[in-house]
Image (cartoon, rainbow, N blue to C red):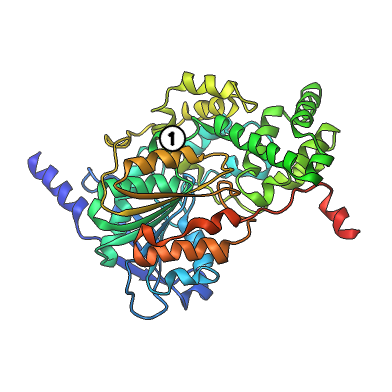
């Protein structure tokens, strides 16, 4: 038994290697190195399933890298990071001027043993109750043939990232995490404190805030702010009365049993608040819905193209690290005090009843003791990771600075000043690793588009 355990430990800790392959897109082949890094699915098991992590490396454009590589970590949970390749290949090329940029599809996403549930992501279910238990059960049965669904959690993703670091031969790295990517980044900082020089955390989601515990309160806060901004803008104030319009819209939906359920209407509005480019349509959408016209709503929320999410990873993480660790009844009570109610909580709990539960790492909720410099950036209008979460995280870090983009949501799509303010600020910090070197004043000047007050097609034709 001792020999078996020793062999398993040796197998799990063997030096990983990067095996190059052709990039799937020919345009990227001239800019990036594509390949895989093999890791064990279960690091405690000898001879178990092996996973090929999909990795893309953008070498520094200046030739030899003079700064630590930047490991980009996307959110979700369940988003593949290589979907960001187009950004770093084009408008984000400044990020790789003096450093390599590394993209790793988290296990279960993209090209890393993908755990997709097509039935849960299809357009046919876009306006049906979230996560049908029967569909979730069918997806579980399908995916269990290729994966142990209990082993696709945050601490496995963290260990995978470090395996890629080692395979590529990097000693120190920098991190850029978004949303759930900040959860992974924080646990990487805690687990490998000497490996990180600097980290940028955008829309901070600490492990203690794993969804969906605070979905409704966070959304209500953002909705109240959005309605207040509408009241402060003359054109929006003259055109709409969003709180009363929303009451009338929900009453109309409730009276029409064949129509869209009100809780699904609200859940879709919550998603529109993620970015300024879509949130500024919300008062107009609500006003039209109040008069019985749902076309603006459907035009704005109908899924276009395939979903980038891998629901198998989302369910594994949120069922094992979210629902399993939260005080469910307390979360329900807080949710019911909002317009959004406990719809999301109840739907995800039913889905998790059909999903295998893994064990969160013992230190999952533990402190982060890292010497790295950490820049935390919050969106003032964020409907899912409110700024107070970043404030709490900043207090727990040794070297941290918190800044805010008042007009931003969960992401900043649609704001002005991304290329003239946000990117230069982040790049200056990453270039120096010095939190004192940045001047966040321009973040206050990043502005959203005006509120939509009429049908954009009609306005364009005038």
Query: Which residue shows up at 84% across the image and 49% down it?
Result: 455
Pointer 1 residue:
209
Pick whichever, 271 or 27, lies toward us: 271
Query: Which residue shows up at 13% across the image and 49% down it?
Result: 7
Query: Which residue shows up at 61% across the image and 55% down it?
Result: 413
Q: Secondary structure at mark 1?
A: helix
Q: Tell me: residue 394, above or below residue 166.
A: above
* Residue at the limit of the structure toward the right, as seen here: 462
Percent x, y for residue 242? 76, 34
Percent x, y for residue 420? 56, 66
Q: Tell me: residue 367, above or below residue 81.
A: above
The picture quadrant where one finds residue 393 is top left
Please give the count of numbered marks on the rendered protein: 1
From the viewer's perspective, is 418 left or right of 12?
right
The answer to whether residue 152 is seen in the rendering is no
* Residue at the limit of the structure toward the left, as seen here: 2
Q: Tell me: residue 99, above or below residue 215.
A: below
Percent x, y for residue 102? 39, 64
Percent x, y for residue 361? 29, 37
* Residue at the limit of the structure toward the bottom, as seen here: 63
The answer to whether residue 432 is seen in the rendering is yes
Pick whichever, 114 or 369, lies toward us: 369
Pick whichever, 4 or 220, lies toward us: 220
Q: Quadrant of the C terminus?
A: bottom right
The picture quadrant where one finds residue 259 is top right
Q: Quadrant of the N terminus?
A: top left
From the viewer's perspective, is 65 left or right of 459?
left
């Amino acid at each position: 038994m001792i020999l078996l355990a020793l062999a398993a430990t040796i197998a799990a800790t063997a030096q990983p290697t990067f095996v190059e392959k052709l990039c799937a897109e020919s345009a990227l082949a001239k800019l990036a190195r594509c390949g895989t890094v093999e890791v064990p699915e279960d690091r405690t098991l000898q001879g178990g399933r092996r996973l090929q992590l999909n990795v893309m490396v953008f070498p520094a454009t200046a030739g030899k890298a003079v700064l630590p590589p930047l490991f980009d970590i996307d959110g979700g949970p369940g988003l593949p990071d290589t979907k960001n390749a187009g950004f770093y290949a084009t408008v984000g090329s400044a990020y790789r001027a003096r450093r390599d940029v590394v993209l790793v599809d988290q296990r279960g996403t993209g090209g890393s043993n993908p755990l997709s549930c097509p039935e849960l992501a299809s357009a046919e279910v876009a306006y049906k109750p979230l996560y049908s238990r029967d569909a979730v059960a069918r997806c579980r049965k399908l995916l269990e043939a290729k994966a142990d669904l209990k082993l696709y959690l945050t601490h496995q993703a963290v260990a995978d990232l470090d395996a890629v670091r080692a395979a590529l031969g990097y000693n120190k790295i920098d991190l850029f995490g978004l949303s759930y990517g900040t959860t992974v980044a924080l646990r990487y900082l805690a687990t490998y404190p000497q490996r990180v020089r600097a980290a940028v955390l955008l829309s901070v989601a600490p492990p203690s805030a794993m969804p969906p515990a605070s979905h409704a309160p966070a959304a209500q806060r953002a909705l109240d702010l959005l309605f207040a901004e509408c009241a402060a803008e003359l054109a929006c104030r003259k055109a709409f009365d969003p709180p009363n319009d929303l009451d009338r819209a929900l009453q109309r939906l409730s009276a029409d049993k064949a129509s869209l359920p009100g809780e699904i209407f609200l859940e879709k509005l919550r998603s529109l608040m993620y970015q300024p480019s879509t949130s500024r349509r919300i008062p107009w959408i609500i006003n039209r819905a109040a008069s019985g016209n749902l076309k603006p709503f459907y035009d704005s929320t109908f899924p276009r193209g395939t979903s980038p999410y891998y629901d198998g990873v989302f369910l594994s993480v949120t069922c094992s690290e979210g629902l399993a660790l939260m005080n469910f009844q307390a979360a329900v009570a807080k949710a019911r005090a909002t317009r959004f109610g406990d719809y999301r909580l109840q739907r995800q709990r039913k889905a998790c009843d059909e999903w295998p539960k893994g064990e969160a790492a013992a230190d999952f909720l533990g402190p982060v003791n890292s010497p790295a410099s950490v820049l935390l950036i919050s969106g003032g209008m964020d409907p899912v990771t409110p700024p107070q979460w970043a404030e709490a995280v900043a207090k727990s870090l040794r070297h941290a600075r918190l800044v805010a983009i008042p007009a931003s949501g969960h992401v900043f799509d649609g704001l002005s000043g991304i290329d003239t303010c946000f990117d230069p600020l982040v790049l200056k910090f990453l270039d120096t690793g010095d939190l004192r070197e940045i001047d966040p004043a321009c973040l206050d000047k990043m502005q959203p588009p005006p509120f939509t007050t009429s049908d954009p097609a009609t306005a364009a034709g005038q």
